[in-house]
Image (cartoon, rainbow, N blue to C red):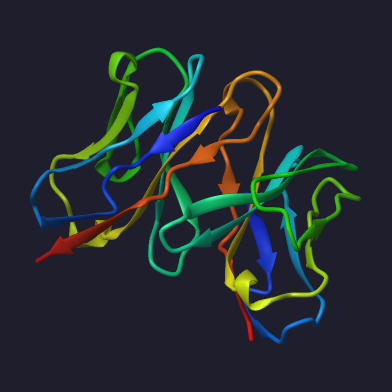
Amino acid sequence: AQSVTQPDIHITVSEGASLELRCNYSYGATPYLFWYVQSPGQGLQLLLKYFSGDTLVQGIKGFEAEFKRSQSSFNLRKPSVHWSDAAEYFCAVGPSGGSYIPTFGRGTSLIVHP
Amino acid sequence: EAQVTQNPRYLITVTGKKLTVTCSQNMNHEYMSWYRQDPGLGLRQIYYSMNVEVTDKGDVPEGYKVSRKEKRNFPLILESPSPNQTSLYFCASSVTGNRQRNTIYFGEGSWLTVV
């Protein structure tokens, strides 16, 4: 069965600092990978996705993520964090084949200090 | 504009009083799903539907029902709500072909409190 682990429940960074949110997955084949962001009181917004090809994926709001098959990871990065990036971030893995049920991680809460 | 619309957005109800949370999408998506989000547990899938009249249980289906009579609508029904169903609920939809597969569009969420 597929699974997603986000090892950090909370991450605190200072505004302007760089950010890396970790995501590890378990899946038997080539996965579809996603990062979503949920701002307070809001729904989930897709930041970026990886299906195949270039392992470094660019997303919205200046985020990027790198797929590393050897490490089963899909970490989210941003070079300089803004206060408005404070939110909950979810990594998700989607299966190939006939089933369309993605699995979400438990989320990482990003706190940004001024 | 592509949208997944849920109603109500906020609801406080009493134990045992049946309620329905509606979900509608305007993207002609085949796949629709309901999730609940609880602190420390992330998103857990309740039910999903691959197409009209095709529904199946997710990870936490107990206490919920769904129906898919039309492609655009996927209501979530709580026949007899209990306090442990107090949660934030998300409806989602997705197209099921090619590279768009599994790119999920979410509604804005419905905050449900059962007292």
Give x and y (percent) for residue B50.
Answer: 78, 36
Q: On the picture, is A59 further left or further right than B53?
A: left
Give x and y (percent) for residue B9.
Answer: 62, 73
Write down the quadrant of residue A110 in the picture.
Answer: bottom left
Give the residue at x 11% y 57%. A15
Is residue A66 or residue B47 the one in the foreground? B47
- For the N terminus of chain A, give its image quadrant: top right
- For the C terminus of chain A, give its image quadrant: bottom left
Give the residue at x 58% y 41%. B104
Q: On the picture, is B69 further left or further right than A34?
A: right
Give x and y (percent) for residue A46.
Answer: 45, 44
Q: On the picture, is A94 further left or further right than A71?
A: right
Q: On the picture, is B87 further left or further right than B60?
A: left
- A99, above or below A84, in the image: above
- A49, above or below A39, in the image: above
- A111, above or below B96, in the image: below
Is residue B3 or residue B64 the one in the foreground? B64
